[in-house]
Image (spheres, helix red, strand yellow):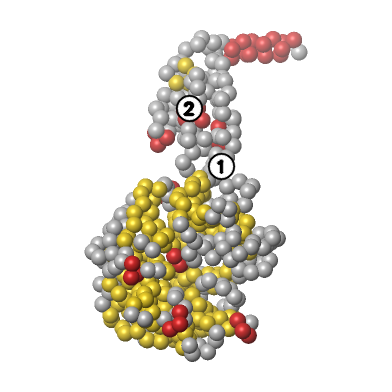
């Protein structure tokens, strides 16, 4: 036994002789990757690392949350970092977080922080069709109706930072303007607007198309070209018109509703990118219901168009969606489909990836705005006998408005929800209390309201517009208001919703 113990002591002594306790710079092991923070794609030098055995390990870093958890000071140029940088924290570290990656990159305890910004105050609240936004070179444009002088234009950068404002001036005869819409054609960026006119005892509405540069400045006369004209007997015109470019941008479909006397129709026409008529105005849908609401149009992949209308027969407590495909000359294609709906469902059409992954197909989104079940539904494969899919869970609130867009990661939703448990506001324009919610493609629902206080939401003027931003971020533009004092404002939200 004593012999074996002596052999063990000798062996341990020989191993100890192979180590060094001198404070020399550590050597790297051949063929191994350097320590965290030394990758060239992290923008740091490759001299960071930890010393070999024999030198005391680096002390813990100042920051201990997020990607910094457990980090210790790296050895750089013969010494440990006095203040930890990416050399110590690793390639995922950022001094100020900019990435939408599901990590707390700046180690402050907040992952992918959202940014809420008050954009601009406005003069009054119009309805949802009075505002629109669209990506342009270097950012986004937003147009809205704010006064009788013309159409306001806001210019944002790619992070939804406001970079400028301007006005598209219009003749006083073009007032009031009731709708604006931005679109892309084969000629470039265009603005559609609807203006009401009263001249020599007659009352009529006109749809105008004007081309803009990427800064929102009209190319030519601000009034552009007149696409259609509709009489307004006794103020009876429903006043809703929408436009959509064909997939190749060479044609524009224009649809509008006629709701006066005993005539209730959705009419449409086709013009080229210059506004020249290719298919004369004609009735696309006729109805004996109380109203036709919210016509919508979408260019589809076969070169034609999908057109929908929301039929309101509230006197009998019934509502329907009517939809049909039309060719490039507005000739009917296939059969019309009619689906039961709800009051003020506010349909939205967009192109989305097909269910079987075989290209893109039109999708219909609509809301249930009233009561305690404010669900948003999606209907795909529109001309197959399928039921809609509920996207948002039931919550105790009322959805005032919603926005939707298809991103590189999938469908993104955001909506304003009012609290039906509140006392009903006095007057038609008084605000409700509410919150902004979002739904990511992965099915995560998030309350994006900045803080515990609710947002003041006008049901008539509520609007939400969504855009995908660079780096995986999302951007929302929305409108709120206050009652005392009476003010209205647009806000922007930059958030991460993978």
Q: Please rate how many residues cluster around mark 1, counting C-alpha atoms within 10 Å: few if below 14, some from 14 to 19, many from 20.
A: some
In the displayed structure image, the side of residue 197 where residue 238 appears, left or right: right
Residue in the picture at 55% in, 34% down: 107
Residue in the picture at 39% in, 73% down: 196
In the displayed structure image, the side of residue 48 where residue 251 appears, left or right: left
What residue does disc 2 label?
85
In the displayed structure image, the side of residue 479 where residue 326 appears, left or right: left
Residue 368 in sight from this viewpoint: yes
Residue 101 in sight from this viewpoint: no
Counting every numbered tag in the picture gives 2
**In the image as oriented, which residue stretches furthest toward the front?**
200
How far apart are the two marked residues, 1 and 2, measured between alpha carbons?
Answer: 19 Å
| Secondary structure of residue under mark 1 | loop
What residue does disc 1 label?
111
In the displayed structure image, the side of residue 1 where residue 105 appears, left or right: left
- Residue 336 screen position, x and y as percent: 48, 85
Residue in the picture at 53% in, 71% down: 346
**In the image as oriented, which residue stretches furthest toward the right?**
1
Residue in the picture at 34% in, 54% down: 166
- Residue 3 screen position, x and y as percent: 72, 10
Q: Nearer the viewer, residue 388 or 34?
A: 388
- Residue 198 image label: none
The answer to which of marks 1 and 2 sits earlier in the sequence is 2
Q: Nearer the viewer, residue 457 or 476?
A: 457
| Secondary structure of residue under mark 2 | loop
**In the image as oriented, which residue stretches furthest toward the left?**
220
Quick check: marks 1 and 2 in contact, CB under 8 Å? no
**Which mark's residue is nearer the viewer, 1 or 2?**
1
| Relative vertical location of residue 35 with respect to residue 157 in this rendering, above or below | above
- Residue 416 screen position, x and y as percent: 57, 59
| Relative vertical location of residue 322 with respect to residue 454 in this rendering, above or below | below
């Amino acid at each position: 036994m004593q012999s074996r113990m002596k052999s063990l002591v000798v062996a341990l002594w020989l191993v100890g002789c192979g180590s060094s306790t001198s404070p020399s710079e550590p050597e790297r092991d051949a063929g191994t990757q350097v320590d965290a923070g030394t990758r060239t794609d992290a923008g740091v030098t490759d001299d960071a690392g930890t010393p070999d055995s024999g030198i005391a390990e680096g002390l813990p870093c100042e920051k201990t949350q997020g990607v910094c958890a457990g980090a210790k000071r790296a050895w750089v140029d013969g010494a440990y970092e006095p203040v930890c940088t990416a050399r110590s924290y690793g390639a995922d570290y950022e001094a100020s977080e900019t990435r939408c990656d599901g990590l707390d990159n700046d180690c402050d305890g907040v992952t992918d922080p959202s940014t809420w910004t008050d954009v601009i105050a406005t003069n009054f609240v119009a309805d949802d069709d009075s505002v629109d936004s669209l990506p342009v070179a270097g950012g986004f444009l937003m147009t809205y109706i704010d006064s009788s002088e013309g159409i306001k234009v806001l210019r944002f950068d790619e992070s939804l930072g406001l970079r400028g404002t301007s006005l598209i001036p219009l003749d006083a005869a073009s007032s009031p303007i009731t709708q604006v819409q931005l679109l892309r054609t084969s000629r470039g960026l265009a603005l559609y607007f609807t203006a009401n006119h009263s001249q020599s005892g007659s009352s009529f509405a006109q749809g105008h198309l004007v081309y803009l540069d990427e800064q929102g400045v009209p190319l030519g006369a601000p009034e552009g070209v007149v696409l259609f004209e509709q009489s307004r007997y006794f103020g009876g015109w429903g006043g809703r018109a929408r436009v959509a470019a064909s997939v190749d941008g060479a044609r524009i479909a224009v649809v509008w509703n006629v709701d006066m006397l005993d005539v209730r129709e959705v009419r449409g026409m086709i013009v080229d990118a210059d506004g020249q008529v290719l298919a004369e105005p004609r009735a696309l849908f006729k109805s004996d219901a109380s109203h036709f609401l919210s016509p919508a149009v979408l260019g589809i992949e076969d070169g034609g168009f999908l057109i929908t209308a929301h039929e309101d027969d509230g006197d009998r407590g019934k509502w329907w969606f009517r939809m049909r495909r039309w060719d490039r000359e507005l000739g009917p294609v296939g059969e019309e489909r009619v689906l039961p709906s709800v009051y003020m469902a506010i349909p939205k059409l967009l192109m989305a990836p097909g269910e079987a992954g075989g290209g893109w197909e039109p999708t219909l989104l609509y809301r249930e705005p009233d009561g305690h079940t404010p669900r948003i539904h999606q209907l795909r494969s529109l001309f197959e006998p399928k039921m809609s899919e509920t996207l948002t869970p039931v919550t105790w609130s009322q959805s005032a408005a919603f926005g939707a867009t298809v991103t590189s990661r999938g469908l993104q939703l955001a909506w304003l929800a009012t609290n039906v448990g509140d006392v009903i506001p006095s007057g038609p324009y008084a605000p409700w209390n509410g919150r902004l919610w979002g739904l990511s493609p992965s099915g995560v629902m998030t309350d994006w309201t900045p803080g515990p206080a609710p947002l003041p939401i006008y049901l008539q003027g509520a609007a939400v517009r969504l855009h995908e931003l660079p780096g995986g971020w999302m951007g929302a533009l929305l409108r709120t208001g206050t009652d005392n004092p009476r003010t209205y404002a647009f806000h922007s939200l930059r958030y991460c919703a993978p």
